[in-house]
Amino acid sequence: MSPRYLLRRLAHVVPAVAGILVVAFVVIQAAPGDPVLALAGQHGDAAYHAFIRQKFGLDRPVFEQLFVYAGNVIRGDLGHSWVHGRPVASLVAERLPATLLLMTSALVLSSLAGVLLGVAAARRADRPTDLGVRLAALLGYATPSFWLAQLAALTLALGTGLFPVQGISDARGAWTGWRHALDVLHHLALPALVLAANELALTARLVRAGVVDALGAEYIRTARAKGLPERAVVRHALRNALLPVVTVIGGRVGMLFTGAVLVETVFAWPGLGQLLLSSVQTRDTPVLLGLFLLVSGAVVVTNLLTDMAYAWLDPRIRYE
Amino acid sequence: MSEVLRTPAGLAGAALTVALGLLAALAPVLAPADPFASVGAPLTPPSRSHALGTDDLGRDVYSGILHGTRTSLVVALGVVAIAATLGVFVGAVAGFRGGSVDEVLMRGTEAVQIMPRFFLAVIVVALFGPGLDRVVLVLGFTTWPAIARVVRAETLSLARREFVDAAHALGATTGRVVVRHVLPNALPTALVVISLNAASVILLEAGLGFIGLGDPRAMSLGYLASNAQRFLRVAWWMAVFPGAAIALAVLALNLLGDALGDLANPRRPSRGRPA
Amino acid sequence: MTRLLRPTALLNLALLLAIPATVGAQTAPARGGTLVVAISADPGHLNPAITTSGATHAAAELLYNGLLGRDERGDPTPELAESWTIEQNGALYRFRLRPDVRWHDGTPFTSSDVKFTFEDVLLKLHARTRASMSGALAGIDTPDDRTVVFRFKQPYAPLLLQLDATEAPIIPRHVYQGSDPQTNPANLQPVGTGPFRFAAYRKGAEIRLARNPTYFKPGLPHLDAIVMRVIPAAGTQVLALENGEVDFLWAVPGPDQSRLRTDARFRLAQTSYHPGGSNCIMTVGFNLQRPLLKDVRVRRAIAHALDREAFLRQVLFGEGRVAAAPISSELAWAHAAGLAMPAFDRAEAERLLDAAGWKKEGEATRVARGVAGVADGTRLAIDFLHFPAFSKYGELMRQHLGAVGIDVTPRPLEPAVFAPTVFKDRNFDTNVISYCNGPDPEIGVRRMYHSSQIGPAPFTNAAAYRHDRVDALFDEAGRTVARDRRSALYRQIQEIVVQDLPYFWLVETPTTRAWAARCGGFRPWTGLFAEAASCKP
């Protein structure tokens, strides 16, 4: 992977980030009412409004405002929540770990399941197994995540008593170390399962397409002709199929954030979902904007990383 | 197109989509009651008089679902229309002009594609107030990148500039070339993208309703599903049927899209091949 | 005989006599255990003196006390103040404070804490205290560490009912003096006098409280710890209760009540007290400045067209009461019984509308024919503003009023937008607001009708109602301490407003608390609801 490629790829990030900032900024400006109110809220007094006006340069020309805003964001200052009275960045930082835990677990689960299902479907393409797998995966995607979450809470948690219905840990136990980790895993199980089920259709579809593709390729036919066992053939095919899966992780991050927010609300998982919900109810615009910027940023970074991983994995690929 | 219908998935998808479309279009005629009117005792289970039961205000759930499907599909169509228009325009311009115009447009496309649609819709609704028109606009303006890519790829593959020059010589405008030649070739792949995006729009709208940003004046499937949350234990039919309707609509569009996608893939193994 | 009277013998005798009293009777409350409470929102901070937010008060009141407490009937009981006297006909209140109270950090509690809390915090930042007291208060004196004197410019009636932990929690002077109470870090690590101390605050997740071993009420509290779990979805709260993960719910959603009531594992209790505001009535407000609503016959017709029983059934699932008077029945002494409230009568509504010049001419909506200030042919179409959470009210308004020829367009507005639209811009025809009467009509009722309360401040006189006699009656009632005299004054007020109909009062909205049957001793009528609670393991 040449340094020139790396630089070019990094250069792509700049317009993406700029675009996101511009959109966020335009939305604030276009909203009805005084942008000061959007950023400061109804409850502040004149002094606080003046402070916000000065901080964001809201009495200066529009382009200057944009630069001030962009400068703030890049320095990590995502604004001030007027409801909580604290920087948005710190509010988000408090709740991000829980959401990341949920998203990563779901990502791992859905990737594994997606690969297994995709392979199974591809090997029996167009036969009942294929259709059955695709249908099941699609159903998981098609059902709204919050609906699936409520169903899971009702049947798998309350119904069987095997799983807790809410929270990240048992309220009554004050455990540490291993017992705490197990407790968290116990609480993580259902939300992660729901989120993964919602999301694995994409991976399964990609893997299936990729394996089906590869299985039809020349070199596979050669391998078969050479008498290579079927399992090895599939493994070869899989290796090629996995590449698109890697590139798509960036888009999945965006989808996972959205899904996580909805699932967290049902399971009272103490992450960004609750922050989003309460900020929506109180119209706490700085927090909403901060969340938008965060998720966008996460997608940008993930795309960058996966592109580099892709290039590293497949030496044939070069974006000239 | 007829090949799609030969695969069971494509057939099922197409059939479901058409059925849903018909139901939605004919909703005002088919619905036994005004979905906003109290027509029965609240929270009655499915019965002969109310096929899918009544909700907490005594409204007929079946009528609500018919109208809700209609609303959700209209929203999806609106989004797709905006996205397709923008996408075709940007993709064609980028493909034809090439060079720096292409670069700039592609960077812009990437930027828009990265933006999380759900969060942007949340902000817009939070700032501008709830309303399906706003949702359609926001989602439309963030969904075009995928279509733009497809159109651009197709435009680029019309590598033979002479062909374009010849068409120009014959008096055809660039626009005509796009419409006559680019679009038909781009259609299969574009349809995949369109159907998948339409499906995700329905889900996004439902999600917005769930967190309280839905349009309460419009009977959409998302509103029905979120309204039913409180009654999960006492009136399962209020949640199950709208949820199933959403799942069906999304499923139909996805099956169709999948089948179309398979078709567009040239290296698909033919039937009867040894595993 | 003398042997029997020896101290140890007497002691033994006493014990022997005592045993039958405990056997068969309730055993002493179980000590220890953790109570898990579900709260609907992360409060953001734990200082209830700077806000009237229900979330903060629900989570944090157990950390503090007020000068007085409230019993089940709503009457004042001693708390930080052990006794009090009312002098000068109610223009001077003298409180004697308990000597044995300490803050959670060990510092002794004195009268200077009370003076500081009121002057520097409550009167500036607590909306209800500021609105009711700041104009009437002349000053607060602290002649010694154990005495606080409230001096008013005129006799001030409601004071004793606004001194509990909800209306006036006392915060420590030695922690807050010299700082901005809204940003002081103690808001996240609070120091109070209450039955429970602060243990931990995990943002977005939970608040942990621990037993205060030096609480000034002997034997209390019984519980070792309380955990307030943040669970925003009401459905999940109920699931958590039924799954045993949570022991106490602040509010059981209507649809789940009958199921939980018949479940032996739970106990339910209905109350009109809520830390965000008590004794609330869902009230339809009319914008009296709009020509369509100026005629009282139109307003009366609207009132007659509304089937309030249907509201009670369909929106509240039977939990609550149709409002029989403008003042909540929970304030029994002020609630006027037997008033001529417009009853549900569609025929009468139609008759009134016809008489007022609104004719049905073949269309669904009536049009004006000879209505003062309204052009002929104008449709009787009004909007109806409400919080999104109250959209059911909008639905029912539309249905009920549509049946008599009034076109209603519900407009849902988020709270942040609702308040300026209604109170600043006055851009509405009708609205519905949950007006909470509070512990005394002076606190929550006056602001709805007094002409001085017309203005941009949220949740004041939305109707812009102006009536000199009503103003005078309110002023007098606020100055009179004798309850029966006040009762008569409020009755006169209610009779007038029921005739004038600047508002129409729909339903009273109590909430139902629920808890696991193995726990008990709750006081749902106050914010210190778990002060005497205990849970069997």
Image: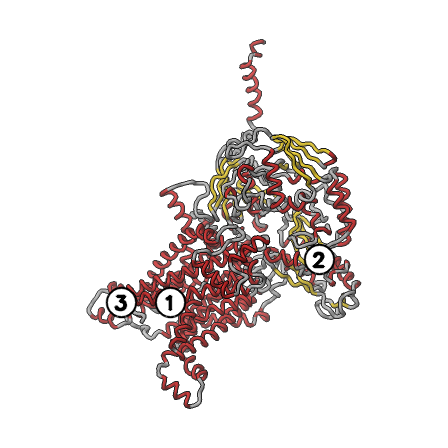
> Which residue corresponds to mark 1?
A12
Position of residue B38 measured from the top left corner of the image (x, y, whole percent): 63, 61
Disc 2 residue crowd, few under 14, some 14–19, many 20+, Cα 10 Å: many
C223 or B110, which lies in front?
A: B110
> Which residue corresponds to mark 2?
C286
Is label 1 or label 3 in front?
Answer: 1
If the image is split into quadrants, where does the N terminus of chain B sit? bottom left
The amino acid type found where label 2 is placed reads Phe
- Label 3 secondary element: loop
Can residue B235 be seen here? The reply is no
B71 or C448, which lies in front?
A: C448
Q: Are marks 3 and 2 on the same chain?
A: no
Q: Are marks 1 and 3 in contact (CB under 8 Å)?
A: no
In this rendering, position of residue C121 left or right of residue A192: right
> Which residue corresponds to mark 3?
A315
* Chain for disc number 2: C
Q: Are marks 1 and 2 on the same chain?
A: no
The amino acid type found where label 1 is placed reads His
